[in-house]
Image (spheres, rainbow, N blue to C red):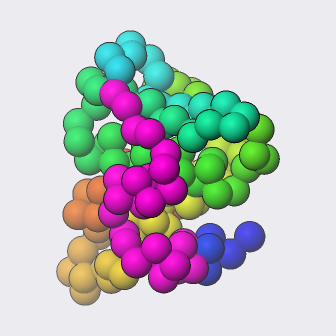
Amino acid sequence: MNYKKIVSDIVCSYKTTDPYQLARYLEIDVDLFPFRRIKGFIMRVPNSNATIVLNENMPEYEQKAFLCHELGHYFLSPANASYLFITSSYMHSKYEYEANCFMVEFLIYGKKIELDETIDMYARRVGVPLEMKSYIKF
């Protein structure tokens, strides 16, 4: 799957790289809840707007990253599916892999790595959680 093209098409269609603004355009409710282990999830109810719930205990950059991850599920996964992303288990299913790839491509869209930057420095600058830096492809 060409995640760069998918993200580029979405950014061009909605004219934003802000995942919160994209969620508003898509009429997806974004809520916060003080989970202990869950980073976030998307819930779809037939004949209703989707809802994404993020862990309010995460730093803002992580909330933004996992909003991108959940938007990845919205765009890439079957329409009836709901997903949980749990802190201690970075799941390796096909759908989690796809959502991770989408998240990273969305966060790095239009942001080039600087000549003297390491991957870790670049990931921090663009908001990619360090445990997801392996998904960064140039």
Inspect the magenta stretch and tell me whether residue 58 lies in it: no
Q: Is residue 90 something that shows in the picture?
A: no
Please report the residue visible at 48 percent of the width from the left and 36 percent of the height from the top: 52
Q: Is residue 23 above or below residue 12?
A: above
Q: Is residue 107 something that shows in the picture?
A: yes
In the rendered image, residue 89, in percent from the top left (x then y), is placed at: 56, 27
Please report the residue visible at 32 percent of the width from the left and 78 percent of the height from the top: 111
In the rendered image, residue 123, in percent from the top left (x then y), is placed at: 32, 61
Front residue of this view, candidates 39 and 74: 74
In the rendered image, residue 118, in percent from the top left (x then y), is placed at: 29, 69
Q: In this view, does 52 lie to the left or right of 6?
A: left
Please report the residue visible at 29 percent of the width from the left and 64 percent of the height from the top: 126
Quarter the N terminus occupies? bottom right
In the rendered image, residue 120, in percent from the top left (x then y), is placed at: 31, 60
Residue extent of the magenta highlight: 7-32
Q: Quadrant of residue 19?
A: bottom left
Q: Is residue 105 above or below residue 54?
A: below
Q: Is residue 72 above or below residue 88?
A: below
Front residue of this view, candidates 47 and 87: 47
Please report the residue visible at 43 percent of the width from the left and 46 percent of the height from the top: 67
Q: In this view, does 110 lie above or below 79?
A: below
Q: Is residue 82 left or right of residue 9?
A: right
Image mark count:
0
Q: Quadrant of residue 5?
A: bottom right
Q: As drawn, which residue projects farthest toward the bottom?
A: 115
Q: As drawn, which residue projects farthest toward the top?
A: 36
Front residue of this view, candidates 16 and 95: 16
Q: In this view, does 3 lie to the left or right of 104?
A: right
